[in-house]
Amino acid sequence: MTRMHPFNRVLAATASLAALTLAADAQNLSPAAEGFTLIPEKPSSVFVDATATHVPAGPVLHVTDSVFVDVDHDGDLDVVVSLERGINRLYLNDGKGRLTHKPGAFGTVQHDSEHVRAADFNGDGNIDVVFVAEEDEAHQLFLGDGRGGFTDASDRLPATSQGNALAVGDVDGDGRPDIVIGSTGEVGQAAGDPVRPAHNLLFLNDPRRPGHFIDAGRTHLPQGNDQAEGIALADMDGDGDLDMVVASPHHANRLLINDGSGHFSDASDRLDLRVPLETRDVKVVDVNGDGRKDIVFFNLTSNNGGWVKDPQTRLLIDDGTGRYRDETEARLPAHRFSSWAGTVVDFNGDGAPDLLVGAIQVPGFVPLQLRAWQNDGQGRFRDVTLDVVPGITVGRSWNMGQGDLDGDGKPDILIGGWGTQARLLLTDVAAYRASLPPAERPGPRPR
């Protein structure tokens, strides 16, 4: 992702350290000694914030992405986390959503990782993991042993780039997962530094050596300066293969159609792009239940540089002819915050996909509360944040991973934060509360 100005980095780090200090001070306070009782916030019937008890502390980590997978074959989902300028992490699950850090699972060297995805790339029945990095261009592939251990096989990735997007799926129809990496071409941080053209990468899984990859970007993808920050693989034209939607911060977003063999052609003229966008994430989902895929673009006004573009999240609806009409004004809540990412989840269990949307005030890079937008079943969304999302989720929401961590059959959410604590929202509210010690009734203590 595009870098913050160094001065803004200092401000962000300072704010994060201040928050850490305040948290530590708060933990040292004794309600009995200080004459106060803790006042719990209004409970949500959908999520409970289990961060304090279930997530390893990391208030200044830059958690850029996460994926939920069972790496040790114990029947529950574990969490793999990518870190910007950190050592990527594995959190093992105890089966009830309590996460424990396993140090060194992905080496001991810090990288500038932006995204992570997982699949069984070599066909041995175990989950493998791929990370992409931006500044140091250290894309990494780790092969799982099925017991929570990984072997570095990054030399099997045939090319590198300043990676800012990642998707995994079988694009050539051979039954093996392939890798798509979206790239940006930035080189320096100072004004006037040269920017080289960015070329997205397509790594096809080698059918003769599963788990090794063939560089097919130059032969299978349209060439151009993509500047991609988000990629979604989905069957957009109903022919049974995976097409590609590309989100860009600097150029128009793109739609690429697959011929079934992994060769993609540009069909971006089918996208109704009415305003200039700085898009950082894209999700493909049927929001109105008509059986056709629609597109959600999550956008910034700028990368904390000022008010530049309209950051309104945009919703494009498949009109039935394979074209995507912008119906944002009629279907989404209006907003002025910037969003680096969102996720699709049916949080109220009515069968219609809802949205959780990360929110950061820009300019200023000010942490805001995660937003919850509820679908009416027809693809029209309303903001239900105060009823659904615990207020403690205020942060610089950078991404959201999801999966059933606590075993209740409903997806839980890990909110990755840039320089703020990653937060865990569990859906088994009753079980979590029952696991905690009794809380005192709020109110002033008698003198």
Image (cartoon, rainbow, N blue to C red):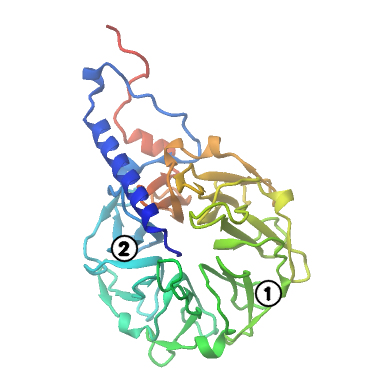
Would residue 349 be found to the left or right of residue 429 on screen?
right
Residue 120 drawn above or below residue 422: below
Name the residue furthest top. Answer: 447
Mark 1, Cα crowd under 10 Å, few <14 / some 14-19 / many 20+, is some
300, 266: nearer the viewer:
300
- The label on residue 85 is 2
Q: Quadrant of residue 23?
A: top left
- The amino acid pointed to by label 1 is Ser
444, 253: nearer the viewer:
253
* Label 2 SS: strand
Q: Image point 27% across, 77% down: which residue?
A: 152
For disc 1, the marked residue is 268
Q: Quadrant of residue 159?
A: bottom left
Residue 319 drawn above or below residue 60: below
Q: Quadrant of the N terminus?
A: bottom left
Q: Quadrant of the C terminus?
A: top left
Q: Position of residue 17 (x, y in %)?
A: 29, 44
Q: Image point 51% across, 67% down: which residue?
A: 229
Q: Image point 43% across, 53% down: which residue?
A: 404
Can residue 326 be spotted in the picture? yes
372, 134: nearer the viewer:
134
Residue 440 drawn above or below residue 247: above
Q: Give the mark nearer the N terminus: 1 vs 2.
A: 2
- The amino acid pointed to by label 2 is Arg
Q: Position of residue 314 (x, y in %)?
A: 65, 56
Q: Position of residue 107 (x, y in %)?
A: 23, 69
* Label 1 SS: helix
